[in-house]
Amino acid sequence: MIPGSPAAPAHANLKNDLTAVVETLLVNNSSYTPGVDEWVEWKVANDFLSADGVELLSTDGVDQVCIEAGSGNDKLVVEELAGAVEATIDYDRVTLVAGQEVLESGPVTTLPEYRNLIGFYDLIAGTNMYPEDGFTLSTSSTFVRDDTISASAGAAEPDDVFTLELENGGGFTVYSLCLAVDPDSGEENP
């Protein structure tokens, strides 16, 4: 509900303080009665709903804008640069259905399915060997478990050496390896 003139200073922070992520945005200004020869110029343009030149709300992501206008001779200006606009005017109610295309289909990509993935979900701190999915990770000292971002194996000592081996002793390819350095250690990032 927007009582009084939508361009009044009382509504100046709506644009910054209120975000609408809805299918239908209903703006009720029906209680406002402007003076003689006065009107409210409602405008939907550049992803904003404005009244008398004052941007009120972002309409980015809103499928439909409904304005319940006051008793004056309100005007509606619609400026949609991205596509056709469907609008319905029913007495004192205006409904806008955005015609902007948000998503577009494109080529399909098949991503590889990695059968062997080490996630460290069962890692126990203080151990020096960790088997998972056909691999064994070992350390020259003991592991420290770190769950800051997700389960991970950390070194207990700065000079620890980690060794990753396939359980059957064969060769393997590493498709992805995520490493992190403790920012408090003073070490350079790898």
Image: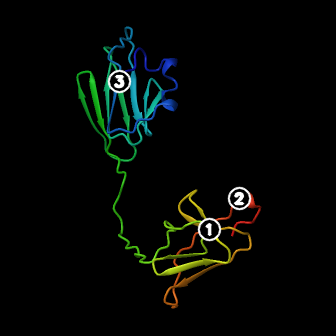
Residue 79's place in the image compared with 106, above or below, is: above
What type is the residue that disc 2 sits on? Pro
Give 188 or 160, whichever is nearer the viewer.
160
- Cα distance, mark 1 to mark 3? 72 Å
Return the x and y of residue 166 as percentages of the image width and height. Answer: 51, 85
- Find the residue positioned furthest to the top: 36
What type is the residue that disc 1 sits on? Gly
Give 30 or 79, whichever is nearer the viewer.
30
Residue on which disc 1 sits: 126
Give 185 or 4, whichever is nearer the viewer.
185
Q: Earlier in the sequence, mark 2 or mark 3?
A: 3
- Cα distance, mark 2 to mark 1? 22 Å
Return the x and y of residue 106 as percentages of the image width and height. Answer: 36, 65
SS under mark 2: helix
Residue on which disc 2 sits: 183
Mark 3 Cα shell of 10 Å, populated few (<14), some (14-19), many (≥20): few
Mark 1 Cα shell of 10 Å, populated few (<14), some (14-19), many (≥20): few
SS under mark 1: loop
Q: Earlier in the sequence, mark 2 or mark 1?
A: 1
Residue 69's place in the image compared with 61, above or below, is: above
Q: Which image quadrant for residue 177? A: bottom right
Residue 107's place in the image compared with 53, above or below, is: below
Q: Residue at x 69, y 70 (%)?
A: 190
In this view, the mark in front (2 or 1)? 1
Q: Residue at x 74, y 69 (%)?
A: 158
Return the x and y of residue 78 as percentages of the image width and height. Answer: 36, 34
Give 71 or 61, whichever is nearer the viewer.
61
Identify the image quadrant of the N terminus.
top left
SS under mark 3: strand
- Find the residue positioned furthest to the front: 126
In this view, the mark in front (2 or 3)? 2
Task: Find residue 75 and name its label.
Answer: 3
